[in-house]
Amino acid sequence: MHFFDPDSTATLFLTRVFDLILLNILFVATCLPVFTAGAALAALYSMTLAMQEGTEGAIFRGYLRAFRENFRQATLLWIPLLLLAAFFGFDLYIIFTQLDVSLRWMQIPVWILLFLLLSVLIYGFPLISRYQNTTKQTVINSLLLSISNIPTTVFILVVHIALVTAALALPTFRIVLFSLLIFIGCSTLAWFFSIFLYRIFQKAAS
């Protein structure tokens, strides 16, 4: 009967897995129209950061409430980030495929700008989910946090780059990764990154 104890390790683990599966389904469903992905990210981090505090409550209601409350600001941040990412990606494509090798140095400022953009992507939506700030202040805070916490920023970037690189290079891994992302992967990654982000936010607030 110990296995069915609501406070047992097994029960807590299974409850967390179920919560992450439900959270993942909600996230994927609300990401399908691409322009809503920013609000979906803010809602996802709203729940995973709350999990670090043990205050997440009902996953379904909590996620939809966070999605609704953060929709406007998260979308206003997401759309420019998406357009800039496409622009920088096109710049890199031109540099590597159309320009002479002697001009490859031009990629350096593009990579720097892309790093700053990804930093805003990493910290911006978690910040929106927890703090009331203007979009401009959120961007500034994201950049400050990314620079003052370079090891964490680089770590999160490396994890994403490693997953994408492995998926592109290994067809079997690509199928497995896609299946996991649809089932539980997105919420699990957000939950894992929230361990570090929560500590950073707590430190910044103290």
Image (tube, rainbow, N blue to C red):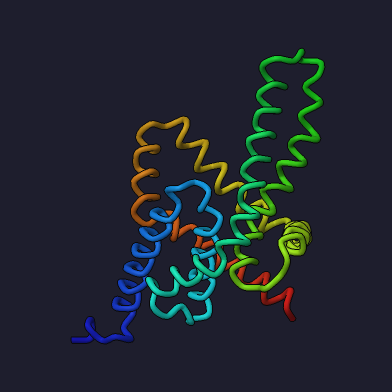
Count of labels in the image: 0
Q: Give residue 20's quadrant in the image.
A: bottom left
Q: Is residue 156 above or below residue 175?
A: below
Q: Is residue 88 left or right of residue 25?
A: right
Q: Give the position of the C terminus as an image quadrant.
A: bottom right
- Going 37% across and 71% down the picture, which residue do you hit? 60
Name the residue nearer the viewer: 23 or 177.
23
- Residue 195 in percent (x, y) is at 56, 68
Q: Residue furthest left?
A: 1
- Residue 205 in percent (x, y) is at 73, 78
- Going 38% across and 43% down the picture, which residue do you hit? 178
Q: Give residue 147's quadrant in the image.
A: bottom right
Q: Give the position of the N terminus as an image quadrant.
A: bottom left
Name the residue nearer the viewer: 37 or 44.
37
Q: Is residue 97 left or right of residue 173?
A: right
- Residue 12 in percent (x, y) is at 34, 78
- Going 54% across and 71% down the picture, which residue do you hit? 49
Q: Is residue 38 above or below residue 6?
A: above
Q: Give residue 202's quadrant in the image.
A: bottom right
Name the residue nearer the viewer: 115 or 32.
32
- Going 57% across and 66% down the picture, which residue do you hit? 70
Q: Is residue 16 left or right of residue 85?
A: left
Q: Is residue 179 above or below residue 169?
A: below
Name the residue nearer the viewer: 106 or 90.
90
- Residue 47 in percent (x, y) is at 48, 70
